[in-house]
Amino acid sequence: MLRAASLIGLFALAGTGTCATRKLLLGDAERGREVFETHSCVTCHGVNGQGGRIGPDLAQMVDRGFTPYRFAALLWNHAPAMFTKLDRMGIARPELTPQQAADLFAYLFALRSFEQPGNARRGKRVFRSMNCAQCHAGNDSLGPGVAPVPTWPPLDHPFLLALRMWNHPPTSLPRASGQPAPPLPHLTAQDLADLLVYLRSVQGRRRNVTLLPGSPAQGAQLFGTKGCSSCHYGSDALEGRPTRYTLNDFAAAMWNHLRPTPLQRVPINAAEMRLLAGYLLSIQFIAERGDAGRGSLLFEKKRCVACHEHPSGQTPGRSDMAGRMTSFDMAAALWKHGPAMRETMRRKNIPWPRLDGDDMADLTAYLHGYEFKRRTLSATPAAPPPIR
């Protein structure tokens, strides 16, 4: 189910400019919330206004372009000040594993995914222009399964709107008037965001609820048992596409699945929708790319070579990191060894190097070393195309 990029061959990297792909661990947003709390992130940082205020609100630093290598770069650049602050506050640092780093990334990405901005006025126009009002306006039901918006359960979250849309009756369902139902409209992610804001305003009883995507491992199983994998394989597989989808993108895609022909689909409940969302969000990051040739130059320029290729052997050399260096591995290594690295660099009068996201992708590609696949795709996320 979890198909990663296969390896094509082994080859030398120096100066090749090779674009390389490495398999990543799948992050679990719910576990990531636990990491955020148990590793004292919440002491200094808030998310969406909740939590510490010493550092920046991390949810506000995440956008569609947030990637594992940008996550690792932000952590790297923040490390000296963060370690100093933790030492002064007497806060211990529990071990951070690569899997926990992946979970923390998934948590932060998911928080921002839920916040695609919408506009109630535009949502009202969408609701009317796309014929939703013919069945769902007012306060009276037009027939079984055709409920007016005020009677719906609270739409506290995109999960819940996506759930109602997937379980929507097919277009062949007759209306109470005896006329066939209008064809289902095509919706963009922005249409859906606007609709969600408008529908919440109509209901007038939104609660302050935080829901996170569920386990990607369990979501992967559901992806098979619900029949999704019977279509989404090969060239239509969703894993590792060079895009960054939000929950609204996925919800709109599920709705648009129903338009060309009424699919023989299995109903989904709220718990299952959370699991599927966890899987679909995580597999966008099943692999990461980097330019190993440029990473080799960065290894010299940023003076990493001063310690990691030192004859004393007191620090791991590149050969020790080969085959096990992704952005999540880098984050875990930084968390464990960062204070000692900072002290060694201070003694050698080496300034702490700053890295942007592309630097981190290329440097970890070089350090990873041997398991690479030639690719022509850009490392910059593209705007999402329609999901088939």
Image (cartoon, rainbow, N blue to C red):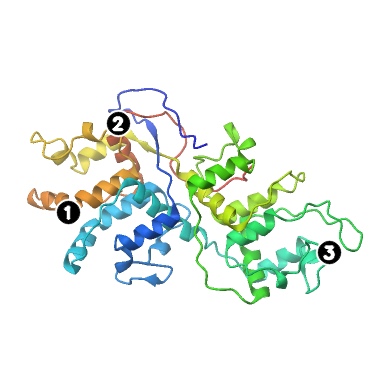
Q: Quadrant of residue 247?
A: bottom right
Mark carried by residue 63: none
Q: Quadrant of residue 129?
A: bottom right
Q: Residue at x 78, y 61 (%)?
A: 145
Question: Mark 2 is on which residue type?
Answer: Gly
Instruction: Decide: few, some or many residues near mark 2? Use Cα within 10 Å; few <14, some 14-19, many ≥20.
Output: many
Residue most toward the bottom? 204
Q: State whether residue 262 appears in this view.
A: yes
Report, in whole angstroms, how far the alpha carbon at label 1 lies from the one at label 3: 66 Å
* Residue 289 to residue 181: above or below: above
Q: Position of residue 237 (x, y in %)?
A: 57, 37
Q: Position of residue 175 (x, y in %)?
A: 86, 60
- Left or right side of 27 for 323: left
Task: For the residues labelled 1 and 3, say whether their Cβ atoms are less than 8 Å apart.
Answer: no
Q: State whether residue 359 appears in this view.
A: no
- Left or right side of 316 for 4: right
Q: Residue at x 81, y 65 (%)?
A: 134
Question: Mark 1 is on which residue type?
Answer: Pro
Q: Position of residue 365 (x, y in %)?
A: 33, 36
Q: Earlier in the sequence, mark 1 or mark 3?
A: 3
Mark carried by residue 143: 3
Q: Secondary structure at mark 1?
A: helix
Report, in whole angstroms, how far the alpha carbon at label 2 lies from the one at label 3: 62 Å
Q: Quadrant of the C terminus?
A: top right
Task: For the residues labelled 1 and 2, say whether their Cβ atoms are less than 8 Å apart.
Answer: no
Mark carried by residue 339: 1
Front position among marks 1 and 2 = 1
The residue at which mark 2 appears reads as 369
